[in-house]
Image (cartoon, rainbow, N blue to C red):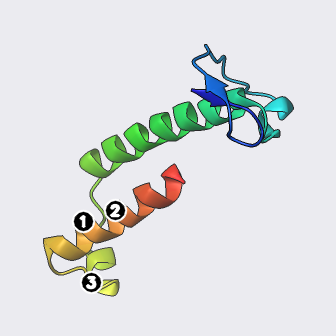
Amino acid sequence: WVSDAYGVTGRVQAVAPAWGPEGFNPFNPGGIASHHIAAGILGILAGVFHLTIRPPQRLYRALRMGNIETVLSSSISAVFFAAF
């Protein structure tokens, strides 16, 4: 759904992602599409990273990550930051 600058009228329209400088124009719907694609790919990569890499024991002790809830909350905040 693509609307006008004021959000009054709109229509369904195919949108090609804009990966270059033109994607930073807030009125270019391709910039929004490219951001969502990039954030999705980065989120998947961050999720795979967090599933496969385990921090060393001294990092657990230094950050006081003794229980699984603390570890999961820290990884969720990292992925949330990367997505937005």
The one of 27 and 33 positioned closer to us in this rendering: 27
**Dot 1: element:** helix
Q: Quadrant of residue 60?
A: bottom left
Is 22 located above or below residue 71 in the figure? Answer: above
Q: How far is the residue under mark 1 from the one under mark 3?
A: 16 Å
Question: Circle 3 is placed at which residue position?
Answer: 61
Q: CA distance from mark 3 to mark 2?
A: 16 Å
* Disc 2/disc 1 C-alpha distance (Å): 5 Å
User: In the rendered view, does 54 fall on the left or right side of 80?
Assistant: left
- The image quarter containing residue 57 is bottom left
x 38%, y 38%: residue: 44
Residue type for callout 2: Ser
User: Does residue 42 appear left or right of residue 75 in this picture?
Assistant: right
Q: Residue type at mark 3?
A: Arg
- Residue 51 % position (x, y): 25, 47
Residue 74's x, y, as percent? Answer: 34, 69
Vertical order, 82 against 21 (above or below): below
Residue 41 position within the rendered picture, expressed as x and y whole percent measured from the top left: 47, 34
83 horizontally vs 45: left or right: right
Instruction: Work out which quarter of the rendered image holds the N terminus and state it.
Output: top right
The secondary structure type at the circle numbered 2 is helix
Q: Nearer the viewer, residue 58 or 5?
A: 5
Residue sitting farthest toward the top:
14
Residue found at the very far left of the displayed protein:
67
Residue 75 is labelled as 2
Q: Tag on residue 72?
A: 1
User: Residue 82, which numbered label?
Assistant: none
| Residue occupying the point 15% across, 71% down | 68
Q: Are marks 2 and 1 in contact (CB under 8 Å)?
A: yes
Q: Which residue lies at the image location 51% right of the left edge and 54% below the top edge? A: 82
